[in-house]
Amino acid sequence: MLKLDFHPAGRHFLQIPGPSPVPDRILRAMSYPTIDHRGPEFGALGLHVLAGIKKIFKTEQPVVIYPASGTGAWEAALTNTLSPGDTVLMYETGHFATLWKKMAEALGLKPEFLGLPGVEGWRRGVQADLIEERLRKDSGHQIKAVCVVHNETSTGVTSDIASVRKAIDAAGHPALLLVDTISGLASADYRHDEWGVDVTVSGSQKGLMLPPGISFNAVSKKAIEASKTSKLPKAFWGWTEIIEMNATGYWPYTPNTNLLYGLHEALDMILGEGLDNVFARHERLAEACRQAVTAWGLEIQCADPAVYSPVLTGVMTPAGFDADAIRKVIYENFDMSLGTGLGKMKGGMFRIGHLGEANDLTLMATLSGCEMGLKLAGVKLAGSGVQAAMDNLTAKKSKPVLKVA
Amino acid sequence: MLKLDFHPAGRHFLQIPGPSPVPDRILRAMSYPTIDHRGPEFGALGLHVLAGIKKIFKTEQPVVIYPASGTGAWEAALTNTLSPGDTVLMYETGHFATLWKKMAEALGLKPEFLGLPGVEGWRRGVQADLIEERLRKDSGHQIKAVCVVHNETSTGVTSDIASVRKAIDAAGHPALLLVDTISGLASADYRHDEWGVDVTVSGSQKGLMLPPGISFNAVSKKAIEASKTSKLPKAFWGWTEIIEMNATGYWPYTPNTNLLYGLHEALDMILGEGLDNVFARHERLAEACRQAVTAWGLEIQCADPAVYSPVLTGVMTPAGFDADAIRKVIYENFDMSLGTGLGKMKGGMFRIGHLGEANDLTLMATLSGCEMGLKLAGVKLAGSGVQAAMDNLTAKKSKPVLKVA
Amino acid sequence: MLKLDFHPAGRHFLQIPGPSPVPDRILRAMSYPTIDHRGPEFGALGLHVLAGIKKIFKTEQPVVIYPASGTGAWEAALTNTLSPGDTVLMYETGHFATLWKKMAEALGLKPEFLGLPGVEGWRRGVQADLIEERLRKDSGHQIKAVCVVHNETSTGVTSDIASVRKAIDAAGHPALLLVDTISGLASADYRHDEWGVDVTVSGSQKGLMLPPGISFNAVSKKAIEASKTSKLPKAFWGWTEIIEMNATGYWPYTPNTNLLYGLHEALDMILGEGLDNVFARHERLAEACRQAVTAWGLEIQCADPAVYSPVLTGVMTPAGFDADAIRKVIYENFDMSLGTGLGKMKGGMFRIGHLGEANDLTLMATLSGCEMGLKLAGVKLAGSGVQAAMDNLTAKKSKPVLKVA
Amino acid sequence: MLKLDFHPAGRHFLQIPGPSPVPDRILRAMSYPTIDHRGPEFGALGLHVLAGIKKIFKTEQPVVIYPASGTGAWEAALTNTLSPGDTVLMYETGHFATLWKKMAEALGLKPEFLGLPGVEGWRRGVQADLIEERLRKDSGHQIKAVCVVHNETSTGVTSDIASVRKAIDAAGHPALLLVDTISGLASADYRHDEWGVDVTVSGSQKGLMLPPGISFNAVSKKAIEASKTSKLPKAFWGWTEIIEMNATGYWPYTPNTNLLYGLHEALDMILGEGLDNVFARHERLAEACRQAVTAWGLEIQCADPAVYSPVLTGVMTPAGFDADAIRKVIYENFDMSLGTGLGKMKGGMFRIGHLGEANDLTLMATLSGCEMGLKLAGVKLAGSGVQAAMDNLTAKKSKPVLKVA
């Protein structure tokens, strides 16, 4: 038997952009006894979480909950709406956009990968004008869907989804809009209905603060229509039967009961704090984090301030330093996990997660660990990021008058 | 916020044939903090559970663990090995065999459904001679796979898988053998390698005593070969990349970390008790349960004593009684959940689960609840099943000599 | 490191008359993070549990909660009200009454032990007329307190406390009335105010369904007055400072925060079910248990049906059998813990707890284990207690009409 | 029902000098099902924790574990060894020493309170020469015990206990040496046997990282001898019966089973890390904390560097500022609890706990919260304590050479 308490004394800091730290409240909720998923209590639970999750997606339309991790929800979005050989326009925002494209290929679709050249495309959000331009050329409507990533977890860029909707509409193109906000949901503002998204894909282990294991498809009427004629084989992922049975709070096959308990608790936490407060908290922490990176004299991976992510910040490491070696120094000295550089960015950056169960002091712990680790690793810093972050955080607080006498 | 503690005072008895009651030990293990699935500790955990689960399947070959519930593993078995339009020979043992067939159709396969006529087929195990006969006729080897259910959860019949293997071999047929032992694994003896199974499908929420949410494909070399040429689209379910990354204890996408903690604990419990002891315990409880049913004068759904299930017992209700109404009486009076009759058996039977976290006294509680509920519901019983079960259980114990003086 | 999961596969049945099985809900509540016991949240928690516990004692007067197990609350009742050398009239109901008397001696008091002769006193409740008689003789009022046990855990006798109050009043005696209901509270009806009790002693690990570790003194105005002049040294147990600080929800020293979380949950469970429903449930289970004992042809330890305990039932074992050897047979064969015979009853009886987290099916499991164990041990039973208990339980349920057609 | 999850989003920082943050591991261990404290498994648990706790006290002699919080263990030390009217020499190190003295008075002892005058005594450790001097004058050996606090939680001073032993010996005085290390144990080095302590008092909620609820008396042979003739009444606290029953791993009355599970886990964590490593970690964090305080230009409450506490650091607030108002600013803005100034120090200091489940990053979070809060509150800081602490922490780490090319 392996010992599952892996870490040294004191609290481990899990500061990757997901899985994010699971709050005690959610772990506790997950320990309720598993019940009969065909029994009367289950229906009450099912209806409750199905209603609550719609508020998080800001939708009045169905949200399908899968007993599977996020990659499955990607597959579900594609197989429910498309047919073998369909052309899909996918935008390259980074590593996860690339993996989704790879999946589309594996499923027999023909993805066309659009984006700015080289690394540059990974440092900026979706360029909606490129999408519009491409769709205008597609007079025959070969393109069946436009796929974009809302919050690119590999870089720290949060794209403007409304602008993509506008681009599709401006081009007068009937393509579906499929959006991955696996790492954006419940951390960054997201509006499934208002933005006219057809399928939104998300997962549990980021802003929802759950362990991995359940994932989501929020779907539009148009997407449901498409699912009726799409030809990719679908069974486990098929929306129809799930949505039908969800009407009474049940699923056609065994759901992930204990993670639904966790979802129930997460909804209570997030809606209790208020979605807007949750977003503001993420924005506040993200800004303080960026102030720190800038004070260090390091470059933020996202090159366009308009699309900085509130979820994570990518930090470019100076030439001559391997980012993963620095991460190792930090891990070994300060018991903190940071995200690695992925794909094209391998070795050249690390990622700081500041999402979900996060507040000012966990951010300060995180930035302290980074600053000390960078120094230990021999990186010359321009100044104290920790100081800059503290200045930034305190500047936003009201100052009480305390001095007496 | 919904209250998640649904039940009245005292312990709820979850006696359905899965999800089975999750032991405290496993719930506790599932509450370990979620870790970075790309970090060094995760690899150790991954290697540990991957090695352990092989012992449960009695295989030296790869076992793929999916972060998805059992229905997904059904899909995985089919999509990894087959191509659109392939003929598969599926044996009708009951409701779950029927659902698997329905899935094969949805995925574009051509299932041929074999079995005894009418309800009879649901009351007996797989008739291997019928399979052999059918395969002998398939001289052109159109049939690409034979699919059977080991432990049919809808009825309580545990088929003889070795006989199916022999039938295929006797027919000299190259078809793959795909077996569902979702509800059999870790409760009934199962031998993936010895029985020459190509893909074994299983899930977490039965004999493994976990909540639903992870599922399995144990695969043979022949199955892996087949996966290289099979044409059904596959991405999330694709074996190749998973098996490749499993070599170091990782997964290509986010695994269900906290359920893997639970699996780690379940392996420790099951292998600690000893697989053979686990099987013997299930057999002992199942026999006592059947003695009870017989004493009540009710019929056991499984009509062939050779294939009685050690996992659950199906109880036929007398004419004039709706089994679900009886279940409701039991649920409301004794806070116990029993399995409903499914498909062809709807209303005519209920199912008693005696698997996983089960012992003599939980069985006696269960049988007492059934006996009292049947009486309350007005069913005339021939005798006391509870008494018969106690007699049966005590007959197997050694009798100490205690009388003094 | 010891493995703390001591038991074999399946659920252990803890059927001793306390500690009683702790519900999952309470264990979960106990896992909330420990907070600053001087911080603002603590006060809210403190006020909440202090208000709730009064309802359980049926009192409007202070209930002192100690961060100590029940024996400490015995000591507190004595040291707060009495002075060295004081005479106290203690009634011998059984082993725990005897231990309390032993404690009084250790503290320098002069206990006078009243009761029926021999074993007989242990089989009947407090005889109030003996108390009245004795007090009438004490014209000099040397007796400062009358001490009785409400629910004698060693035997299964629940005495009539109101009759003791009447006896004291009838004698016109000023002695304080101190009552131990450690194992009675929240299982058997108890009325601190209505019965005119001066100090009621209780603990957490019985009807409150908590682990051991907190205990109680409910106190009357007269008791508080007595505490002001009593001379036994008191610091940790001293009421004054605790009651004073409790006004705002705090304690003078560090309270047992996590058990107070558990108490909060227990109050929610008990008051949610309704105290009267809780008592009725205990009465129902106790009666069914006694029917079983009678059907076995064994003798119930409590010889007076008017004072049968709803909390536990003492079972006399036939001559020639050592009760502890039988308990061992049951423990080893059925993984169930029963209470041993204590003091005068050592070897001649065992005790079945049916309190707290108990319902019909846990009782049936318990009785099945006893019946099978008794048979294995060679005890000749007159009939099936399990059958008798089932008959008793079903007789109290409404019978639905289910037969169709 | 009150909601027990009191805190806003993100992790609360409980940085008081106890109760210290309880690690998940311990909360999980505390959720094992309560067992029969008279059953066979309990003895194994009892023996295990009784053996382990001796290592923490560095003693071969008995350690008595009480199911009561720390104040009870103070009382136990006094009542077991002393008689009414006995003179005890108690040293005034701070608020807790004062409370212990108050308790001695309440119990009918005659404490003589020794110490440096005014606030000065609260800022320095025990002056052993004063003790020696006083004992030399006590030629009639009226003084029966010398009572000192090892780690004074109200100030952050860790006294030299060995020097007290030497002083007593030098004076050739037979007084017992009673030491309170409630907040020192398992954080600061402590040697019950080597230092010749007669009774060491400790509790669970500090270095042992448990919730409050169990407490300890480590006792010498001389103390046990004294207990045989001491006249203070004792029952619950009495050592004799407990030590006797502990021989087989049991207690005379109901122990706090679930906290003993927690103790079992705590022992595994602490002895697993190694006591010396635990102490070194505390020293490292304490030094970094003091560097921060100094950099802020604030005064450390402990005026003698030789006795700085590794457990907590007292920070003096500048004239004109109420320390509790600053604590409130920090609590409300940064969700962090700090210790208040107690007794003579009320309003003039706050206390930072850095004990138990603590590491570099939790300390940095803590110091960041203090620094930001002090600034918000309008305190002029001389420099960045956070920077100083980071410099201090990194200076102690080995610097890897990472630069490539």
Image (tube, coloured by chain):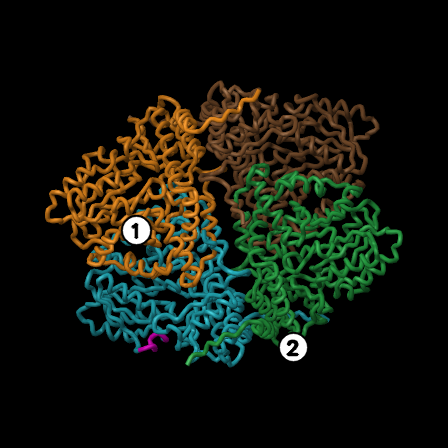
Chain colours: A brown, B green, C cyan, D orange
The residue to which callout 2 is attached is B382
Q: Chain of mark 2?
A: B
Work out whether A177 lies above or below B52: above
Quadrant of the rendering where the C terminus of chain A is positioned: top left
Q: Is residue C21 left or right of residue C168?
A: right
Work out whether D234 lies above or below B85: below
Label ID, residue A266: none
The residue to which callout 1 is attached is D217
**Which quadrant would residue C184 be assigned to in this image?**
bottom left
Closest to the observer, D139 or B67? D139
Residue B252 in picture, x, y percent from top left: 66, 38
**Kind of residue at badge 1:** Asn
Residue A70 visible to an observer of this rendering: no
Q: Residues within 10 Å of mark 1 (few under 14, many from 20)?
A: many
Discs 2/1, front: 1
**Which quadrant would residue A155 be assigned to in this image?**
top right
Residue A291 in picture, x, y percent from top left: 51, 23
Most frequent secondary structure within the magenta stretch: helix
Residue B182 in picture, x, y percent from top left: 68, 55
- The reply to whether the magenta stretch includes residue A98 is no
Helix or strand or loop: what does disc 2 sit on? Answer: loop
**Which residues make up the magenta segment?**
C118-123
Q: Residues within 10 Å of mark 2 (few under 14, many from 20)?
A: few
Q: Is residue B52 left or right of residue C253?
A: right
Q: Chain of mark 1?
A: D
**Kind of residue at badge 2:** Ala
Q: Is residue C223 left or right of residue D269?
A: left
Helix or strand or loop: what does disc 1 sit on? Answer: strand
Residue D323 in picture, x, y percent from top left: 33, 32
- Whether tag 2 and tag 1 are in contact, CB under 8 A, the answer is no
**Which quadrant would residue A200 be assigned to in this image?**
top right
